[in-house]
Image (spheres, helix red, strand yellow):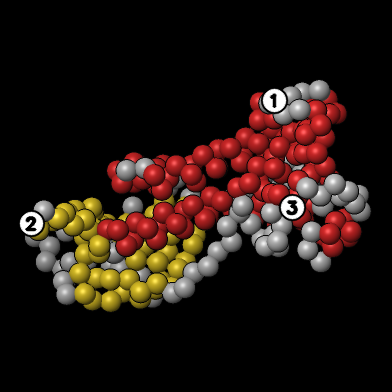
């Protein structure tokens, strides 16, 4: 839900000019209210919110003191990746429903936009400026880490391959691979915990790609050597 700087709910609306349809959000005024009406172009705020929500979902991962099990990690990554990939493709109405299901609340302020996702809050520096009868947003540059989906998938499959080699339990995500390839995948589970965390957070060195990781034939067992090998140190 979107709230204006006065704390009032803003509702989606539209106007038509010729053959063009313009979407916007405006303050929902009650009967007899004549206070200031806030109106904001829909595309501008929707792109910002969807990007922030996707970034938030990408950064989520199982928080444990030790490595999560392969099944937990694969399930968490699959669920997260599915929504991250599909959300930008949803029709506008479906995007709104998805954001409501995630308990997303957007509060417009004079100098910031506060996006609440459940108990988490994201604050983006911004400025509200008048554009005729509408209000525009000037957004401060906002850069965030973006996890590499290929690397994340390899990490999940690496733990699944390790479980298979130890217990014989074969997860569906690696069922199609040959025994030789599974042994290569299992080596990824040897990586230091901080390296695994950096990959899942998207903060790994830029030179570490999926191809680089899979082509590393002799990954050291000691963590300092691993960090040096892959550019973490």
Alpha-carbon distance for marks 3 and 1? 23 Å
> Which one is earlier in the sequence, the residue at label 3 or at label 2?
2
User: Which residue is labeled 2 in the image?
Assistant: 18
User: Which residue is labeled 3 in the image?
Assistant: 212
Q: How crowded is mark 3: few (under 14 residues within 10 Å), some or many (20 or more)?
A: few
- Residues 134 and 87: in front is 87
Q: Residues within 10 Å of mark 1 (few under 14, many from 20)?
A: few
Q: Which residue: 90% across, 51% down?
A: 220
Alpha-carbon distance for marks 3 and 2? 54 Å
- Residues 129 and 171: in front is 171
Q: How crowded is mark 2: few (under 14 residues within 10 Å), some or many (20 or more)?
A: few
> Which one is earlier in the sequence, the residue at label 2 or at label 1?
2
Q: Position of residue 216 (x, y in %)?
A: 81, 49
Query: Horizontally, is 216 left or right of 19 in the view?
Result: right
Q: Could you tell me which secondary element the residue under label 2 belongs to?
A: loop
**Quadrant of the image occupied by residue 110:** bottom left
Alpha-carbon distance for marks 2 and 1? 56 Å
Disc number for residue 175: 1
């Amino acid at each position: 839900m979107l709230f204006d700087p006065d704390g009032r709910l803003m509702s989606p609306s539209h106007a038509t000019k010729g053959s063009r349809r313009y979407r916007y959000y405006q303050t929902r005024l009650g009967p007899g209210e004549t206070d200031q009406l806030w109106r904001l172009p829909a595309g501008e705020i929707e792109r910002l919110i969807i990007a922030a929500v996707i970034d938030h979902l990408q950064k989520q991962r199982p928080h444990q003191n030790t490595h999560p099990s392969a099944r937990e990690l694969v399930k968490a990554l699959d669920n997260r990746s599915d929504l991250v990939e599909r959300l930008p493709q949803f029709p506008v109405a479906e995007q709104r429903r998805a954001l409501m299901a995630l308990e997303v609340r957007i509060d417009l302020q004079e100098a910031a936009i506060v996006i609440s996702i459940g108990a988490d809050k994201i604050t983006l520096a911004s400025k509200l400026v008048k554009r005729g009868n509408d209000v525009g947003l000037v957004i401060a540059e906002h850069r965030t880490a973006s996890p590499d989906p290929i690397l994340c998938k390899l990490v999940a499959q690496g733990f699944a391959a390790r479980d298979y080699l130890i217990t014989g339990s074969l997860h569906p995500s690696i069922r199609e691979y040959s025994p030789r390839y599974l042994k290569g995948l299992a080596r990824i589970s040897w990586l230091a915990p901080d390296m695994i965390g950096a990959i899942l957070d998207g903060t790994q060195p830029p030179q570490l790609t999926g191809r680089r990781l899979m082509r590393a034939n002799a990954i050291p067992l000691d963590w300092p050597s691993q960090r040096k090998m892959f550019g973490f140190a």
